[in-house]
Amino acid sequence: PRVMGRPIRRTGLRLFAAGTIVAQVAALLRYTLLAWWLGPEQLGLAAMLVLTSQFFEQITDVGLDRFLIQSGAGNTRGAGAAVQLAVALRGLLIAGGIAVSSGLIAGFFHHPELRDGLLLLALAPAIQGFQHLDYRRVQRHHRFSGEGLMTIASETVSLIVLVTAALLLRSYVAIAIALIARAIATVVTSHLIARRRYRWGMPGPHRNTMLGFGLPLILNGLLLFLGSQGDRLIIGNQLGAKELGHYSAIILLILYPAATLSKLLQSIHLPTIAAARDDRSEEHTSELQS
């Protein structure tokens, strides 16, 4: 592949693909082992925790990790520091949202005991917000090994912790503990592989660009969640945890392979698309100047 006549040299694709496959296999094993050891009702309660996490993640997703790839300013240290601050604040916001609404969510699903699991789950996004996003920045230059390594480490740790917690507790809260472990592994690995120093900074001159990039995604977040996960909300609310457990296991087997392939292709080609757009913009500017 080429961008405006220049050949593209991608590195780390095998490791990145391996990480994507590990994440797929780990997700399948998580649901399979929970269903096997804990039964469909506990699996359904675990699915409710995951649904809650996905809801808050999606309605607050402003795509700033992709901003580091797509924006012309994404490679600057100032933009990187501003994005890191925004991501940390978002993690704390999600954690607070889960904690404050835990009672309402437990009531929606008709399982009061779910509140304790939600309060535990809130720790995961709070920790995840402190990850170092330099692995995303270097994807501008088609370097993918960092994300692959981070995914392998975090998913492996998460699976080991899940197995241990499920065997010891025999409860759906094992998934919350596993998500916390994954967040810790993600943060630690992301800092170890980073090429730049981790720091926070105010948006400054990047504020308008970041807002223009992220606000449309926020507006679509709720609709995207309802479109992709609304069926599980209805099943959990109307039919209960047991049926949600059965449904989630089936959907996972059907949809995850396609979702994994989509993520792999999107991540690989996003830097190419962004670079081609920038090249065309520069070419147009040169024509106007001449």
Image (spheres, rainbow, N blue to C red):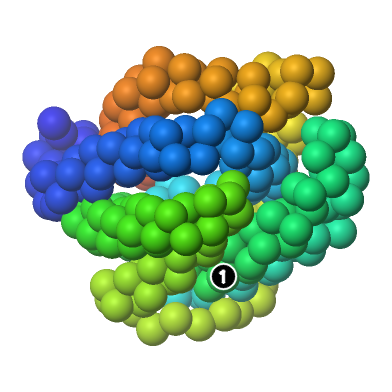
Q: Is residue 167 above or below residue 222?
A: below
Q: Residue drawn 47% across and 17% down? A: 250
Displayed quadrant of residue 77: bottom left
Q: Nearer the viewer, residue 51 or 172?
A: 172
Q: Is residue 170 left or right of residue 53?
A: left
Displayed quadrant of residue 236: top right
Q: Quadrant of the C terminus?
A: top left
Q: Position of residue 124 (x, y in %)?
A: 58, 62
Q: Nearer the viewer, residue 223 or 160?
A: 160
How many other residues sit within 10 Å of disc 1, few (<14), some (14-19) or many (≥20)? many
Q: Position of residue 244 (x, y in %)?
A: 63, 24
Q: Is residue 226 visible?
A: no
Q: Position of residue 39 (x, y in %)?
A: 53, 33
Q: Position of residue 87 (x, y in %)?
A: 60, 64
Q: Residue drawn 56% across and 29% down? A: 40
Q: Which residue lies under the disc numbered 1?
A: 127
The amino acid type found where label 1 is placed reads Ile
Q: Quadrant of the N terminus?
A: top left
Q: Is residue 99 left or right of residue 190?
A: right
